[in-house]
Amino acid sequence: MWAVTRPPTAAPAQRVCPRCSRIAHTDDRRCPFCGRGYTRRPLASLVLVLLVFAAGILGGMALMFAAVADRVEDELDTRVVTIERDIDRSVRDVGDDLARRLDQRLRERGLLAP
Ligand SMILES: [Zn+2]
Protein backbone atom coordinates (compact mmCIF):
# COMPACT_ATOMS: atom_id res chain seq x y z
CA MET A 1 0.00 0.00 0.00
CA TRP A 2 2.45 2.62 1.28
CA ALA A 3 5.56 1.55 -0.53
CA VAL A 4 8.40 3.92 0.16
CA THR A 5 9.76 4.81 -3.21
CA ARG A 6 11.64 7.76 -4.50
CA PRO A 7 10.10 9.78 -7.33
CA PRO A 8 11.89 9.17 -10.60
CA THR A 9 12.93 12.81 -10.81
CA ALA A 10 14.71 12.84 -7.44
CA ALA A 11 18.46 12.97 -7.24
CA PRO A 12 20.35 9.80 -6.39
CA ALA A 13 20.89 9.09 -2.73
CA GLN A 14 23.82 10.62 -0.95
CA ARG A 15 26.26 7.91 0.08
CA VAL A 16 29.44 7.95 2.09
CA CYS A 17 32.15 5.59 1.01
CA PRO A 18 33.31 3.39 3.93
CA ARG A 19 36.82 3.25 2.45
CA CYS A 20 37.69 6.75 1.27
CA SER A 21 34.97 8.59 3.26
CA ARG A 22 34.01 10.72 0.26
CA ILE A 23 30.39 11.64 -0.31
CA ALA A 24 28.79 10.92 -3.67
CA HIS A 25 25.27 11.24 -5.04
CA THR A 26 25.03 7.94 -6.82
CA ASP A 27 22.97 4.80 -7.09
CA ASP A 28 25.98 2.74 -8.14
CA ARG A 29 27.08 -0.13 -5.94
CA ARG A 30 30.65 1.13 -6.02
CA CYS A 31 32.26 4.41 -5.01
CA PRO A 32 32.99 6.56 -8.10
CA PHE A 33 36.20 7.85 -6.47
CA CYS A 34 37.97 4.74 -5.21
CA GLY A 35 35.94 1.99 -6.89
CA ARG A 36 35.26 0.07 -3.68
CA GLY A 37 31.77 -1.22 -2.85
CA TYR A 38 29.54 0.74 -0.52
CA THR A 39 28.53 -2.33 1.43
CA ARG A 40 31.02 -3.70 3.86
CA ARG A 41 31.67 -7.38 3.86
CA PRO A 42 30.24 -8.76 7.10
CA LEU A 43 32.57 -11.75 7.04
CA ALA A 44 35.63 -9.51 6.94
CA SER A 45 34.28 -7.50 9.85
CA LEU A 46 33.51 -10.67 11.77
CA VAL A 47 36.99 -12.01 11.09
CA LEU A 48 38.48 -8.71 12.25
CA VAL A 49 36.42 -8.75 15.46
CA LEU A 50 37.40 -12.37 16.11
CA LEU A 51 41.06 -11.58 15.51
CA VAL A 52 40.96 -8.64 17.92
CA PHE A 53 39.12 -10.80 20.46
CA ALA A 54 41.61 -13.65 20.11
CA ALA A 55 44.55 -11.26 20.35
CA GLY A 56 43.08 -9.77 23.53
CA ILE A 57 42.51 -13.16 25.13
CA LEU A 58 45.90 -14.54 24.11
CA GLY A 59 47.64 -11.36 25.24
CA GLY A 60 45.86 -11.50 28.59
CA MET A 61 46.76 -15.15 29.04
CA ALA A 62 50.38 -14.42 28.14
CA LEU A 63 50.49 -11.67 30.77
CA MET A 64 48.92 -14.00 33.33
CA PHE A 65 51.40 -16.77 32.58
CA ALA A 66 54.28 -14.31 32.81
CA ALA A 67 53.05 -13.09 36.21
CA VAL A 68 52.62 -16.67 37.48
CA ALA A 69 56.06 -17.62 36.17
CA ASP A 70 57.60 -14.65 38.01
CA ARG A 71 55.88 -15.65 41.26
CA VAL A 72 56.95 -19.28 40.91
CA GLU A 73 60.51 -18.22 40.19
CA ASP A 74 60.57 -15.96 43.26
CA GLU A 75 59.15 -18.72 45.46
CA LEU A 76 61.69 -21.22 44.10
CA ASP A 77 64.54 -18.79 44.73
CA THR A 78 63.38 -18.28 48.31
CA ARG A 79 63.12 -22.02 48.94
CA VAL A 80 66.49 -22.75 47.34
CA VAL A 81 68.14 -20.14 49.56
CA THR A 82 66.45 -21.63 52.63
CA ILE A 83 67.53 -25.17 51.73
CA GLU A 84 71.11 -24.04 51.04
CA ARG A 85 71.21 -22.35 54.44
CA ASP A 86 69.89 -25.51 56.13
CA ILE A 87 72.47 -27.68 54.34
CA ASP A 88 75.29 -25.32 55.31
CA ARG A 89 74.16 -25.42 58.95
CA SER A 90 73.93 -29.24 58.88
CA VAL A 91 77.40 -29.61 57.38
CA ARG A 92 78.80 -27.17 59.96
CA ASP A 93 77.11 -29.12 62.80
CA VAL A 94 78.51 -32.44 61.53
CA GLY A 95 81.99 -30.91 61.31
CA ASP A 96 81.74 -29.49 64.84
CA ASP A 97 80.49 -32.84 66.17
CA LEU A 98 83.34 -34.72 64.48
CA ALA A 99 85.90 -32.27 65.87
CA ARG A 100 84.42 -32.62 69.37
CA ARG A 101 84.47 -36.46 69.22
CA LEU A 102 88.02 -36.48 67.84
CA ASP A 103 89.19 -34.17 70.64
CA GLN A 104 87.44 -36.39 73.19
CA ARG A 105 89.12 -39.57 71.87
CA LEU A 106 92.52 -37.92 71.70
CA ARG A 107 92.11 -36.75 75.32
CA GLU A 108 91.03 -40.26 76.40
CA ARG A 109 94.21 -41.70 74.91
CA GLY A 110 96.35 -38.96 76.38
CA LEU A 111 97.42 -37.62 73.01
CA LEU A 112 95.88 -34.23 73.63
CA ALA A 113 96.30 -32.04 76.64
CA PRO A 114 93.00 -31.75 78.57
ZN1 LIG B 1 35.51 5.54 -2.02
Image (cartoon, grey):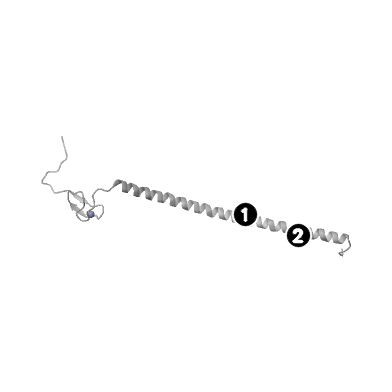
User: Could you tell whether 8 is left or right of 75 in the image?
Assistant: left
In the image, which disc is placed on residue 95?
2
Where is residue 109, by image quadrant? bottom right
Q: Which residue is drawn at 32% across and 48% down?
A: 45
- The furthest residue to the bottom: 113
Q: Residue 79: which disc?
A: 1
Of all residues, the one furthest to the right in this rendering is 110
Label 2 to label 1: alpha-carbon separation? 24 Å
Q: What element carries label 1?
A: helix
Image coordinates for residue 7, horizontal then vertical, percent? 12, 43
Label 1 neighbour load within 10 Å: few <14, some 14-19, many 20+: few
Q: Quadrant of ligand 1?
A: bottom left
Give the image location of residue 49, x and y in percent: 35, 48
Which quarter of the rendered picture does the N terminus lie within? top left
The percent coordinates of residue 50 (x first, y second) are 37, 47
In primary-sequence order, the first of circles 2 and 1 is 1
Q: Which residue is drawn at 53% across and 55% down?
A: 70
Name the residue: 50% across, 51% down.
65
Label 2: state its secondary structure.
helix
Disc 2 versus disc 1: nearer the observer: 2
Q: Which residue lies furthest to the top in this view?
A: 1
**Where residue 92 appears, x then y in whole percent?**
73, 59
Q: How many labels does the image show?
A: 2
Q: Quadrant of residue 34?
A: bottom left
Structural crowding at the residue carrying mark 2, measured as other residues with C-alpha within 10 Å and reported as few (<14), some (14–19) or many (≥20):
few
Point 40% across, 49% down: residue: 54
